[in-house]
Image (cartoon, helix red, strand yellow):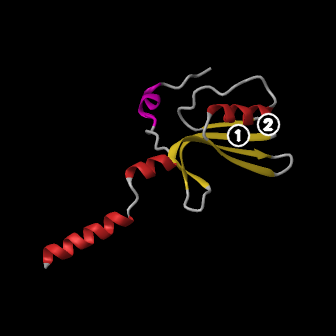
């Protein structure tokens, strides 16, 4: 009887849990871009999956020839009128079809080496 109940519970749990393949299809690498315009007081949030889209957004707001390089850690750019924040994230699709993201965990930078340096006196 006990074996039958364990078997029944395990079949019930496995039937409602999503498979690993299904979860991996809904999750991928991407970028979270947040642009704040201090002149208009507007905010723009973007979740994109390709580096070309990030460069297009960068050119759209900053109107320059520069392109963002490799994004290892979150980047903040502020020029007095605009503030741009770019971070690599894990993008996934919610059950209602909208995209959402989870921030990557970056290792802490070591501040010990900098603390040991002597300050420069001019």
The label shown at residue 84 is 1
Cβ–Cβ under 8 Å for marks 1 and 2: yes
Callout 1 environment at 10 Å: few (<14), some (14 to 19), or many (20+)?
some
In which quadrant will I find the N terminus? bottom left
115 in the magenta segment: yes
Instruction: Find residue 99 and report its horizontal and vertical position in percent.
Output: 60, 53
Q: Which mark is residue 61?
A: 2
Q: What is the span of residues highlighted in magenta in the rendered image?
A: 109-117
Q: Quadrant of the C terminus?
A: top right
Q: Nearer the viewer, residue 19 or 110?
A: 19
Mark before the other along the chain sequence, 1 or 2: 2
Position of residue 9 in the picture relative to residue 68 (left or right): left
Q: How many marks?
A: 2
Q: Return the residue found at the far bottom.
A: 1
> Relative to the observer, which residue lies in front, 84 or 120?
84
Q: Secondary structure at mark 2?
A: helix
Of badges 1 and 2, the one in the foreground is 2
Dot 1: element:
strand
Q: Residue at x 81, y 46 (%)?
A: 38
């Amino acid at each position: 009887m006990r074996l039958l109940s364990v078997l029944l519970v395990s079949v019930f749990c496995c039937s409602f849990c999503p498979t690993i393949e299904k979860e991996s299809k809904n999750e991928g690498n991407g970028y979270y871009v947040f642009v704040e315009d201090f002149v208009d007081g507007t905010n723009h949030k973007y979740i994109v999956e390709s580096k070309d889209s990030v460069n297009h957004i960068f050119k759209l707001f900053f109107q320059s020839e520069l392109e963002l390089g490799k994004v290892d850690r979150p980047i903040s750019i502020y020029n007095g009128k605009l503030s741009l924040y770019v971070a690599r994230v894990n993008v996934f699709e919610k059950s209602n079809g909208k995209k959402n993201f989870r921030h990557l965990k970056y290792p802490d930078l070591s501040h010990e080496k900098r603390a040991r340096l002597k300050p420069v006196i001019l």
